[in-house]
Image (cartoon, rainbow, N blue to C red):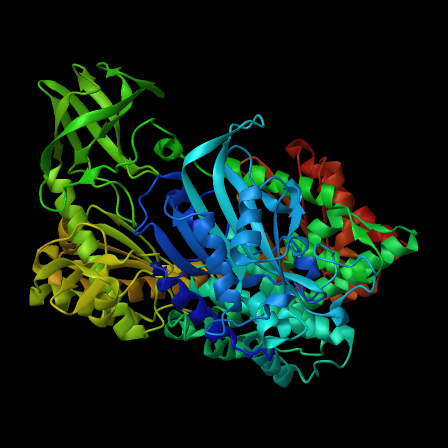
Amino acid sequence: MTQKKYGLNELREMFLAFFETKGHLRLPSFSLIPKNDASLLLINAGMAPMKPYFTGEQEPPRHRVCTCQKCIRTGDIENIGKTARHGTYFEMLGNFSFGDYFKKEAIPWAWEFLTSPEWAGLDPERLYPSVYLDDDEAFDIWHNDIGIPAERIFRFGKEDNFWEHGSGPCGPCSEIYYDRGEKYGCGRPACTVGCDCDRYIEVWNVVFSQFNNDGQGNYTELAQKNIDTGMGLERLAVVCQDVDSLFDVDTVMNITHKVTELTGARYGQSHKTDVSLRVITDHIRSATFMICDGVRPSNEGRGYVLRRLLRRAARHGKLLGVSEPFLYRVVDTVIHENECQYPELREKQKYITQVIQMEEENFAKTIDGGMKIYADLLASHKAKGEKTFSGADAFKLYDTFGFPIDLTSEMLEEEGMSVDKAAFDTLMEEQRVRARKAREALGDLAWAGIDLGLNTTPTRFTGYDKLTDSGEILALVAEGELSESLAEGQKGIVVLDRTPFYAEMGGQVADHGVIRVGSSTFLVGDVQKDKGGKFLHHGLMEHGEMQVGNTAEAAVSVERRRAIMRAHSATHLLDKALRTVLGDHVQQAGSLVEPDRLRFDFTHFSALTPKEMAKVEELVNDAVLEGYPVTVEELPIEEAKKKGAVALFGEKYGSVVRVVDMGGYSVEFCGGTHLDNTAKVGSFQLVSEGSVASGVRRIEAITGKECLKAMNSNRFTILAAADALKVKHSQVLERVTQQMEEARELRRMVDLFKSRELNSEADRFLFSAKPVGELKVITAALRDRTPDSLRKMGDFLREKAPNVVAVLSSEQDGKISFLAVCGKNAIGAGVKAGDLIKKVTSVCGGSGGGKPDSAMGGGRDAMKIDDALALVDDFVAEKLGL
């Protein structure tokens, strides 16, 4: 049968539309940055963001969903470009059931999508299913319901067809392989499904999550059985387009075409060239999506993953003869090929491009120097006949020149060598330990990841509408341990079913206040939110005691909350002002909102000028004076975007979002607490602006009462200065300027008098100089002269008398200084200041050195200063041969 060749974007839409016909809710791809999952740096599978739904921690929006999930995997980065299968960025198609349908539906639907002419339309004769060894149920569905002959169904063991990861939910899986034909095979007569060659390619894998593993190898049936399907979109496209590899798929190849245009390299020219083109193509795809989702290059975590991808791609550009940054010029093509599914790429194109360009330029500054050092180190190892590159040298390349370890490993592989990875890892761990010790302890944050043994219902936050509320005590922690009660004097945590206290999140600090049970009082000094949505009130049991199950009255500190709201609302106005003054490329990169103080990090690539600072401050205060009403509403996310609401960069939002609208001037997604009118900000004042990271600036500002404090402090300072200067406060600047000018004139006159005094003293020394041959020798012990004044005196003597040899000493605050100078005639006669100072200072137990015309040194024994000066005549006479 003739196979219709669908484009990658067509196949993605086809899959999602198919499962919508089966009652599935289509969800957008989750961010590549995992949410509330510390086990992952980056999302690496379609089911990874679904874990809370599978475990029951969260209720899914529907029990049938389908997605196309962006994924990053770098575990086998060394194979990228060399094989047809490996890529760091890929999209995973998935259909999921959370306790709804199971094998009887999942298997037929998989077959229908792959083989129906209405959908993918693959040749059924080229498809081969596999099942777990003991999964007779799945085998029977394939054989009896679908009609696949028994000999075409393959049974494999746990290694291939059983999904589990330690203890917890697990189960068998069924995979579907596609026969690409003999030209992709290994040629062995026994080549069949399961062979390592590229002939039989897995296109579909459905996991039947039906057991619970207790960790000891004992399996029990799950009450809620789940379906987790994973199908690589690029792999499906390889099959449907009948191309050799994922790099030959339409959208990916279009990116490669752009890379060839920029590098001048031709795809298919040689294996080495093809590897470089594939590496660049793959890595720029990954980098573009990672930056769009909020990852920035750094030396730790996911930022390091991004950095090494960009630097590895840049190095392959070097191998193709490209000496200038070029990766950023491929971004537009990556976006063009993917924006139909991911429109946010186009929205953030300018920022993505700038981040990549800056990273390229930074690496370009070190790569040439690093390559030279690498070549020297490599030559040294080879000269010794070594086949292993030391871990210390690899760490030096990483730490000094920013060479990721896999980049060094790749270069060594090309030389037939390997790297001592264990030694490198040891040095890296030592560096991490040093870094950890330098950080402050997590403190209250530590409990945010602890299971309190409660149900999964989050704490209900009522603090948007009220600052006092009653709630039931669900759990208590006393002195670091779960407890049924909290006694007077104990530090602890109180968990309520509902609370008006805002937990620290989104950059806004937590509320403070008090929780009461009758006359018992718990002082709240911090509030954190755990992974299950419970609010943890940290503090001190000031009086009495409380127990689990008590009804408590929670009251937020009104003054502190109002001050926080002033700062938070001002933060939104600042964000708007920055976009207005600097441009739409400005994105929030972090914030801290405290009582009447705020810190705002944003993407921008240069320091703000004083004029820009003044304009930003003016715009914020204008918005305050306008008295814009602040309204808050919850809207479907698409409706909110149409309204122009600005989303926090890199944040993942649900289908319904909270929108804070300040009279249409500023409209943003935000879960924080705000004023009801911008006029209540009071006033706004910028305090500082500076850089915190490459391409990220930071502004600090104050509002409300902190502004009043600053203004009063400045006013009192001016009044005090006016009183001291005996002028009106309006004349302070004029008077200070006048006095500064007078002070400069006085300093000039003092310097002139000192210069004249030095000249006069120098004349006296020359007049009394002792002749030794044709030279004039001067020795003098001076009091309380600084080394600088000695040098000036020496310069005068040397300039006035070319035949002078002078040694001056001074004792000041118990410290002995010596200066030796020689005029040009003295130097010509063989007398050098450097030699002379060594001789003189050694007498006093010191040392010194310098040039032939001037040298300085010090001594320890003041009693021997005269002895030291006395030998100068003999030293000169000896040098003159007298």
The answer to whether any part of residue 551 appears in the image is yes
Q: How many marks?
A: 0
Q: Which quadrant holds residue 118?
A: bottom left
Q: Which quadrant holds residue 860?
A: top right
Q: Residue at x 62, y 64 (%)?
A: 311
Camera-side residue of 572 and 243: 243
Q: Residue at x 64, y 66 (%)?
A: 126
Q: Is residue 68 left or right of residue 759?
A: left
Camera-side residue of 722 and 299: 299
Query: Residue 757 at x, y = what percent?
Result: 50, 59
Q: Is residue 295 left or right of residue 448?
A: right
Query: Residue 398 at x, y = what percent?
Result: 66, 54
Camera-side residue of 864 and 69: 69
The N terminus lies in quadrant: bottom right
Q: Which quadrant holds residue 655?
A: bottom left
Camera-side residue of 738 and 633: 633
Query: Residue 792 at x, y = what percent?
Result: 58, 58
Q: Residue at x 18, y 20 (%)?
A: 549
The answer to whether any part of residue 724 appears in the image is no
Query: Residue 596 at x, y = what percent?
Result: 19, 49
Q: Residue at x 55, y 79 (%)?
A: 4
